[in-house]
Image (cartoon, grey):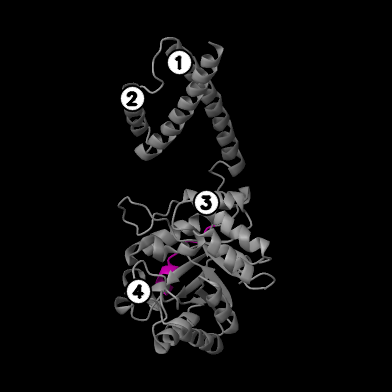
Amino acid sequence: MDIKNSKRPYIIAGPCSAETETQVLKTAKLLSENGVNVFRAGIWKPRTRPGNFEGVGSKGLKWLKRVKEETGMQVTTEVANTKHVYEALKAGIDILWIGARTSANPFAVQEIADTLTGMDIPVMIKNPVNADIDLWIGAVERFQKAGITNIAAIHRGFSTYTKSKYRNEPMWQIPVELRRRMKDLPIICDPSHISGRRDLLQSVSQKAMDLNYEGLMIETHIDPDNALSDAKQQITPESLKILINHLIIRHRKSTDADIPESLETMEELRTKIDEYDNIIFEYLNKRMDVAKNIGIVKKKSNITILQTDRWNEIMENAVKKGKELGLSAKFVNKFFQAIHQESIQQQTEIYNRLSKEQ
């Protein structure tokens, strides 16, 4: 798995589940003709409830071995316990991936990492089902400590209780933060599990490319409408080729030489960003000083810290002002909620300090 030195996007494709030997081989041969880097297929499928199709099991490993022999592609499958690992390694699987349910369980991750200690095999780690970046990073670190050096993260979205057009909310800010904290870790997007439906695959894939991801993992099936699992989010090999051909792959880094003379240079624009950031911090500091003084007044006047009516008034005015300036209500809400939480914290510390002095 040489993602860093491969042409973007690095493509991993194949069916959600290996269903029959014929289905696997036909899909693989078509994908190999489209330049897919790695063939994927699940053979052990963790389902939410029993009774659903839970994969063909170990016999699917023979089918993946044939894919390697007949197409030359590397193959990958999901492993969730030590038994899966031993069988996959014995069958010559090139890359292992850790699913979202498994990566959410540090005990399971550690068990698999211990099994792989000292082995030279690439591992891909999907984000945990819950939106916890430290849990995701922790899973990566467990494999790093086991001596695994060829690791990639897979962003497949996060489960939430809120209704959305997505099957799993992308929460792009989490993989962006992962990139900041683990800058050398390749990130692959799984638009199939984020989208849950075919019509969103193109836009999610493009977003991932625009955010500088290294690759995509897309579920691909020769007859997706009749797939035994996740039928709505799978596409045909032909559709995958169209999707890839329509992607706009932008420069990962730019120099001023890439920018038309009529536009400001990146350095000039970044300097402006730094200047405005400094101004924001200066005014945030001044605002917090005022919040502290309000805390003193509240404490000495025996008034509660939280004043709901005032807070609602601030938020209504902020959202209105933000709309006038072209800022989304979602952004304004998050920004002012963070400010309010810090103000509450500062005033709480004022209350505690003054109480001790009395």
Q: Earlier in the sequence, mark 2 or mark 3?
A: 3
Q: Earlier in the sequence, mark 4 or mark 3?
A: 3
State which quadrant residue 265 falls in.
Answer: top right
Tell me the amino acid under the disc marked 2.
Thr
Q: Nearer the viewer, residue 69 or 292?
A: 292
Q: Earlier in the sequence, mark 3 or mark 1?
A: 3
Callout 2: few (<14), some (14-19), or many (20+) C-alpha neighbours within 10 Å?
Answer: few
* Residue 185 visible to the viewer: no
**Which x, y percent locates residue 296?**
48, 13
For numbered disc 4, what is the local secondary structure?
loop
User: Residue sitting at 60 percent across and 49 percent down?
Assistant: 181
Q: Which mark is residue 294?
A: 1
Left or right side of 219 for 154: right
Tell me the amino acid under the disc marked 3.
Ile
Callout 4: few (<14), some (14-19), or many (20+) C-alpha neighbours within 10 Å?
Answer: many
Q: Which mark is residue 133?
A: 3
* C-alpha span from label 1 to label 4: 58 Å
State which quadrant residue 218 falls in.
Answer: bottom left
Q: Which mark is residue 229?
A: 4
For numbered disc 3, what is the local secondary structure?
helix
Callout 3: few (<14), some (14-19), or many (20+) C-alpha neighbours within 10 Å?
Answer: some
